[in-house]
């Protein structure tokens, strides 16, 4: 080969190839979240649950409580529990279903894939939230059919804090847990332990130990978030501080460790 | 092939330089160096667990190297933009979401690489997966169908380099022949193919160049003739009309003879056995070297890494 060293043997000319754009990566990730039976029907099931809850509410609630805002709180609660599962499935399937081998071969710059997944997760969450809001409108109209004269105005704090912000926090929590555990069933169990069992445990401890009640919002993220979707939906300065402190413990730190892990894990 | 201009025979498309990968105390790949040339099919051969897959995983950046490096066309894999357009990779045909259809898996690949949807149909046709089959979910695919889908996925971006780990695994004989033809013509058009296998016969038929690996180390490399150049044929299988007479004449010459099936196994070269038969006017019905050629060489070279301790045919 030395005799023909002047000829550029066996080289790849990559100068005319563009990187895979972030938009393309994010679009593919959104598609991946919806193109399996599990993913597609999970989203349908969430929306179906919202419809069901609003119909039951229409028949059960007093006519004076059938305002748009009341109907908006129903999907707010349901999505809060289930939206994170969508992103948990999207992230953990790379390892559990092993398609990470292909994903990270087609885009070996892993931070870009992580970002694309996050963009996809947030986009999906916003999409589901918009659909849920439309269902809340439909629910309110249905409430009128059952005899109510609803109030259509919405408290901006409820909309932002109780609906958008709390659900986005949930999506990020799902993202962090998914990357930390990297196994679909394991991550879902961990997520429900975090979102259901942990607040109950804290509640019990708070009931037994009076002093713990004051400490709880400083150490438990779910408890700290309660002011976002209750009362006047406006946390006080101290409550924001509690959200910040617990958010660092339960969200920022796990998210950083999770990303660190995803960037290094050997997909087999 | 878009990069065909830059590809000429005799170059080095894939260059593995002193690659080592350790997992704690275990060394999966130990100081491995080799090249895969454009226009040729390079076979990467070794027993199970020899380090083939790890080497290929390092090649495409899924596993970091402990030391050493691999370049493809002069680049580290992670520096190649939209790598699917340049390097087609199939590491494990089963490593796909079991709930996706074959068509959906190809569509995701095509979208990522920025290819038109028509490319998916072209590839399905190329690997002979029917429209109906392409709409079935991967969990319902046989291993052979998964391999075809994986090869389609690797070829999606019209790459000039193919890296395939055990691509013939699970294919039926017709499928293996089809793949052989596909890869040969791909290499003839200037493409670089690196394929691994633990089956020697498979690689022997298709590869222009062979890299033998055992215990994480390269034990031999070259084409078939080069690999066999140093092998002496010292054992012969022979069958004669009168086996007893032949046995006597061979033993008279001092060769060890043992009955084997309907014939004899002689520790001598075929030429010596033939000569003994001719001198005694014994009619032979079968005469051949008992060495499996490449197979024996392969087993011998990797013997200390084989899981089985008793390997027939490798007394030497």
Image (cartoon, grey):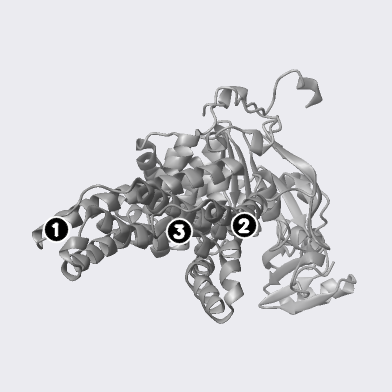
Give the image location of residue B2, x and y in percent: 52, 26
Earlier residue among tags 2 and 3: 3
Earlier residue among tags 2 and 1: 1
Which sits in the foreground, B245 or A36?
A36
Q: Which residue is mark 2?
A: A254
Which of the 4 image quadrants contains residue A242?
bottom right
Quadrant (top left/top right/bottom left/bottom right) for the C terminus of chain B: bottom right
Does residue A57 appear to the left or right of B4 in the view shown? left
**Residue A142 circle label:** 1
Disc 1 vs disc 3: which is toward the camera? 3
Circles 2 and 3 on the same subunit: yes
The residue sitting at 40% across, 49% down in the picture is A164
Which of the 4 image quadrants contains residue A213?
bottom right
The residue sitting at 71% across, 32% down in the picture is B12
Give the image location of residue B306, x and y in percent: 76, 67
Q: Distance of mark 2 from mark 1, alpha carbons?
A: 42 Å
Does residue B74 appear to the left or right of B92 in the view shown? right
Circles 1 and 3 on the same subunit: yes
């Amino acid at each position: 080969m030395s005799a023909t060293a002047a000829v550029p043997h066996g080289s790849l000319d990559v100068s005319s190839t563009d990187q895979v754009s972030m938009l393309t990566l994010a679009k593919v990730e959104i598609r991946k979240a919806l193109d399996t039976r599990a993913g597609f029907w999970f989203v349908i099931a969430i929306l179906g649950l919202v419809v069901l809850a609003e119909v039951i509410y229409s028949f059960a609630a007093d006519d004076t409580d059938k305002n748009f805002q009341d109907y908006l709180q129903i999907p707010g609660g349901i999505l809060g529990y289930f939206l994170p599962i969508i992103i948990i499935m999207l992230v953990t399937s790379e390892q559990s279903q092993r398609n990470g081998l292909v994903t990270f071969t087609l885009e070996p710059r892993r931070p870009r894939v992580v970002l694309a997944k996050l963009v996809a997760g947030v986009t999906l969450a916003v999409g589901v939230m918009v659909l849920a809001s439309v269902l809340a409108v439909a629910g309110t109209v249905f409430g009128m059919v059952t005899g109510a004269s609803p109030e259509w105005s919405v408290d901006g704090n409820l909309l932002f804090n109780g609906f958008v912000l709390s659900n986005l926090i949930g999506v990020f929590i799902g993202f962090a847990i998914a990357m930390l555990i990297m196994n679909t069933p394991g991550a879902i169990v961990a997520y429900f332990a975090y979102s259901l069992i942990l607040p109950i445990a804290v509640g019990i401890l708070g009931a037994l130990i009076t002093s713990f009640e004051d400490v709880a919002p400083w150490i438990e993220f779910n408890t700290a978030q309660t002011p976002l979707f209750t009362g006047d939906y406006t946390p006080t300065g101290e409550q924001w501080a509690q959200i910040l402190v617990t958010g660092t413990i339960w969200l920022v730190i796990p998210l950083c460790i999770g990303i660190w892990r995803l960037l290094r894990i050997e997909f087999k | 092939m878009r990069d065909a201009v830059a590809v000429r025979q005799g170059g080095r498309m894939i260059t593995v330089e002193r690659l080592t990968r350790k997992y704690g105390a275990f060394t999966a790949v130990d100081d491995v160096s080799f090249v895969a040339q454009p226009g040729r099919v390079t076979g990467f051969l070794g027993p199970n667990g020899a380090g083939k897959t790890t080497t290929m995983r390092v090649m495409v950046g899924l596993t970091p190297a402990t030391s050493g490096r691999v370049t493809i066309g002069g680049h580290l894999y992670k520096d190649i933009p939209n790598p699917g357009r340049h390097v087609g990779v199939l590491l494990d045909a089963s490593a796909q979401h079991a709930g996706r259809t074959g068509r959906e898996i190809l569509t995701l690949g095509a979208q990522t690489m920025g290819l038109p949807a028509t490319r998916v149909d072209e590839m399905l046709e190329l690997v002979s997966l029917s429209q109906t089959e392409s709409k079935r979910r991967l969990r319902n695919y046989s291993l052979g169908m998964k391999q075809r889908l994986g090869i389609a996925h690797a070829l999606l971006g019209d790459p000039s380099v193919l890296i395939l780990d055990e691509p013939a695994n699970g294919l039926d004989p017709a499928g293996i022949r089809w793949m052989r033809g596909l890869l040969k013509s791909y290499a003839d058009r200037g493409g670089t193919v690196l394929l691994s296998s633990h089956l020697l016969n498979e690689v022997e038929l298709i590869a222009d160049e062979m890299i033998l690996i055992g215990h994480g180390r390269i034990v031999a490399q070259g084409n078939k003739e080069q690999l066999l150049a140093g092998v002496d044929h010292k054992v012969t299988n022979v069958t004669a009309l009168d086996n007893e007479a032949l046995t006597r004449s061979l033993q008279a010459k001092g060769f060890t003879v043992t009955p084997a099936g309907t014939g004899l196994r002689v520790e001598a070269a075929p030429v010596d056995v033939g000569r003994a038969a001719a001198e005694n006017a014994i009619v032979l019905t079968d005469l051949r070297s008992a060495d499996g050629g490449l197979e024996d060489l392969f087993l011998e070279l990797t013997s200390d890494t084989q899981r089985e301790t008793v390997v027939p045919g490798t007394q030497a």
